[in-house]
Structures are given as structure tokens and as C-alpha cells.
Amino acid sequence: MYFPDGIPTVLVTYGANTPAGGAPAEGTVRFTPSVPVIALAEHDRVFTGSGTYSFNSDGDLVDPEGAVGVRLLPNDLDGMNPSGWQWLVTVSVTGTPARSFRIFIDSSQEQVDLADLEQVDPAKADYIAVPGPKGDKGDPGDDGTGGGSLTAANAYTDNAIAGEVTRANNAYDAKGAATSAQIAAAADATSKVSAHVAASDPHGDRAAATTALGAHAAATSTVHGIADTTALETKTGAQAKVNTAIATEQQRADNAYDPAGSASAAQAAATSAAAADATTKANAAVASAGTDATAKVTAHTEATDPHGDRAAASNALAAHVTATDPHGDRDAAATALAGHASATDPHGDRAYADGKLAKTSNLSDLQSATTARNNLGLGDAATRSVGTTSGTVAAGNDSRLNDARTPLAHKASHATGGSDPLTAADVGALPISGGTLTGPLATTGYALGQDTPAAHGLAGWCYPPALAVNSTQLVNGVLYLVRINVAADGPVSKIWWWIGNPGSSPVAARNEVGLYSSSGNLLAAANVDSVISSAGPKSTTISSQNVAAGAFYWAGMVFNAATPPTLTRASGWTGVETAANLNMAPQAYCFAMNGSGRTALPTSFNPASNAGTDFAGPFAAIGN
């Protein structure tokens, strides 16, 4: 509900089906106040605007959340400003024209069916439908004289009905009278306009206007202040004189500017001739210079000795080639080379090279191979042969490395008092004297004589189902959360829950059960529209999820129906919301609610916003 707290409202319902085939109606219903703004005393809100609502798949009018019916403000609340307003209802159903009618809602009504208020006969005048309580029973009539016949009774009934129809029509003739008055006024206005158009002198000034126009036309002595009217030129004559003057001026201008045209022609001819002569002479000069340069280059190239020094250069080169020591250093170089070749250590590195290994010897020139192996940390395995006898090494495929020999029994050595005793701590066990488990303990049976989820093939539950001894009807649109602790790793693909009393008329696609992580993220969900209308334990299949030992998860539930289901639960005593979540933060509550007005399970929620439920439940379990 979107109305502020403390403001009374009335639930208005409406259901419709098509008369042909009976299918649920499709369309909308709009509610519009007859005034623009409504204020209520002692409230800091005003109400304005209209609302449009649709039909669901059953043909019932529903609010935006899918709940059947729409809540409206009554018309008679104390302190309402203005007062005396009504609701205008417009019904738009597919396949029929939209229809509108007005209603008045009494605040004493908890629920009103719009079908009881709708004006179904459009031929009747508009009226305000007001739902009210049934009147008191009238006084009994006089006893009849007896002896009446069926025909007389039918005639009496027909007359009574006809009288009531006449009385109703007369009572609601206000709009008809207004229409008649409007038609009469329109007819009167049309008649008066026609008379005005047809009248010879509707304004009473036609004769005076005719006289003045005649005097103006006959005046020859003065017109518009011009005394000599004979000097006035006619329009045609004046236009002819203007045309003649314009033509004369055009001819004079052409004659005056003709020399400029001649000068331009002469100038263009001279310019063209000069340009042609200059181009011809320039082209001739370029051609002559090119021919001269080509001839000189050709003569230089073909000359035997164009620079006059060819013979001297040839003689100098021949003398250099035939000289025994052209550079004067041949004897010194020969002496240095002979000394280098005969030197014992010409580069000064012979002593260093003599102490190094030769790569061509492949380590055969080592002084001691044994010392070299010891220095490399190789031991003596490198010098042994492969074999199965003493003094040999085993190969990788030696059968002794993979035979299935049974180890010698030696558990006595690990017992208390043995040569190598083990303690409980050595193997991660609890001692006989007791201890503390710091992690989850998974069991497969009745541990310590207690009923466990594992004994039922489940991964976890909120409590044994036998403790679900009572039930509570859930609230539409509220997210309910049930904590389930998990003792062992493994997959889960089902959620178990339990309906004590069935619900009815579920809103399509708005009833879901799912699994959340402890951080509030939705892991998997499934729609349960089809199962909330029957009682008993329910097993809802979800996509398989792997749960972890020592972690907890929440089973989440949300319902939306005309009658939400009643689910089984444990304690409902006063204070259970505190007791069931004792010493826990909201994000770890065992039983909680988180948000309202929901139409589906949210993809995530904030666990810190959890609020405790006033009952320990509903019951839930997970498994396969």
C-alpha cells in the first residue's frame, strides 16, 4: 500500500469477462478525481493526478503489485478540502468503446465492487452512484382482501414498474433540460444572425453613406484638398510618361559609355600582340642556348685529353706500379714479420695457454679424474655399471622398484609404550580425555543418539521436521529467510518446505522459493505458483549447487496470492524473534525477514538489514 500511515482507504474491486466466449477481459480502468488537488487536515501530503490499472489473467482488476483490487481515497473524510468531489471512472475494455461514470465512496465501506456502482445504460442521464448500507425494513402493508387473480397481480406489477421508470426519468431530467435550453439558445442565435444578414439597413446608416459617396463622385472643384481637379493626371497617363522617361535615360547612358567599350577592345588587342611577340623571342633564345651547351659538352666528352694532363698522369702511375719499394718501408716490414714468426711467445700468453684443457682432448688431459668428480659432487655412482648385484646401480625399469611387496607389520612400534609411539595430536584426533572440535563434524547416522540431517539423506535443516508443531500465514510480498547450517561438502538440488493450510489464487510468476549464500546472493530459485494451493510437505527442485562444510545458507521464500499459504513452524511464543536469534547479529539470524512489496526473490539483499520473525520458521531443509 502506498498511502501514508493513518489515512483511511477503501478497496475497490472489479471483475469482467467477455460476453462472447466468457474469456477474461483485457484493458484498463482509470480513476480520476473531479478536482485537481485534495488536501487532508492533519496530514502534510496532498493528493493529485489519476491512476490507471489493468486486468490480470483472470479478468480481475489488480494494483501495480498484482494484488486484486485498488485502494482509493474515500470522498467523505473529515477535514477534506475540497469536499463534495467525486471519482470519475473510465473503463476501457478491448473490443468495446470506453465508458465513463462517476461514483461516491463512503469511508464506512471496507470494500466496494465497482460492478455494483457502474452505470450500464448510456441512454440515461449521468448520475452519481453512492454505495450505502441497506435500509431498514418497512412497515408491513395491510392485509389483502383476498380473491385476487394472477392477471390482476401482473397488471399491478407492470403499472408499478412503469410508474417507477417515469419517476426515475423525471428525477434525472436535469441534464435533458439543460440540453433543451442549449438547443433553443442556438436556434435563437441562428435566427438573429440570418435576420441581420437579410436586413437592407441593419445598422441604420445606409442612406447617409449613399449620399456622401454620390457627393464625392460628383465633386469637380475640390477633391482631397486639391482645388484644380483638371490638373490631376490619370493613372494610365502617368505610367506612360514614366515609361518614356526611363527608356530615354537608358539610351543616353549607352551612348555616353560606348568609348569605354572601344578603348577596352583596343587595349585587349595590343596586349595580345605584345604577349605573342615576347613569347616567340623567349622560345628562340632558349632553343639557341640549349643547342650551344649540348655541342660544348659533346666536344669535351669526345676529346682525348680535354684538360692537357693525361700523359703526365699515365707516366706517374706506371712508375709507382713498377717500383720495388714505392712507400720506402718494405725492408722494415720484412724484418718485423720474421722476428714475430721466430719468437717463442710473440703475444705474451703462451704460459697461460699451456695450463688450459684442449677441447680436442675431451677431458683426457685432466690431471685427476677422481678429484674432478669429487669437486663436482658426483660421488662414485658415475663410475658404477648398471645391474642387480652388489656394486652396481639400478636402472629405471628395474623390477625391484615396482613389485607389490607387503610392508612389514610394525603398528606395535607406534602404540603407547612402543619404540615410535604416536599421539592423538599426531594424527589430528581428539584424545580420550576429551577436547574441542574447531571445524564442522559430518555424520552419516544418529550421532550421539540424535536425529541428524544426514540420517535423512539431507545436507542440512533448520531443525528436525518433527518440531514444526504449528503454522503461520505468511504476508504477501515479504522475503522470508531460514538459516541452514551445513556439516559436509556436497551438492544440493532440492529445497523442502511445508504448507499447513493452502493458499488460493496465486498471482502468476510471483511465488518463488530459492537458496541464498550467507552474503545474500541468490544461488538458485524456482517458481511455486502451482503448489501453494495444496497442503503438505513440498520438495522444490533447483539447479544443483555445491555447499561447503562449516558454512551456512538461507532458504528464501516470497508469496503473492489472494490468500497466501500458511507454513509450518516451531515456537511462536512472545519474544521468539529475540530468543531464536539469541546473541546473533542480523546478518547471521536463524529466522528473518528482509523487505516487503516484493514480486520475486531479489538477486541479492543486504543481510545487515534482516529483521527477526515473530515465529521460529518456517521449516526448511536442503539436500538431493
Image: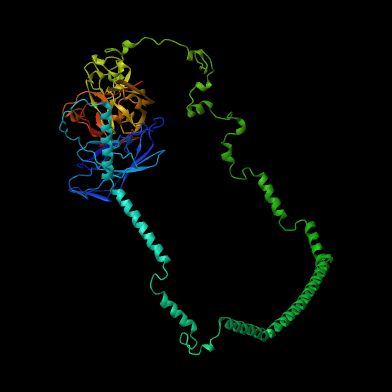
User: Residue 56: x percent and y percent?
Assistant: 36, 34
Please, is residue 273 above or below residue 611 in the view? below
Looking at the figure, which quarter contains the N terminus? top left
Between 508 and 606, which is closer to the camera in this rendering?
508
User: Residue 88: x percent and y percent?
Assistant: 30, 45
Q: Is residue 511 visible?
A: yes
Residue 207, quarter of the rendered image: bottom left
Residue 68 relative to residue 387: left or right: left
User: Residue 149: x percent and y percent?
Assistant: 25, 26
Q: Residue at x 18, y 35 (%)?
A: 135
Looking at the figure, which quarter contains the C terminus? top left
Q: Is residue 596 visible?
A: no
Between 527 and 113, which is closer to the camera in this rendering?
113
Q: Residue at x 33, y 11 (%)?
A: 411
User: Residue 276: x percent and y percent?
Assistant: 76, 76
Residue 242, quarter of the rendered image: bottom right
Between 504 and 390, which is closer to the camera in this rendering?
504
Which residue is farthest front?
Answer: 147
Please, is residue 346 above or below residue 414 in the view? below
Q: How many marks?
A: 0
Between 53 and 129, which is closer to the camera in this rendering?
129
Q: Residue at x 37, y 57 (%)?
A: 187
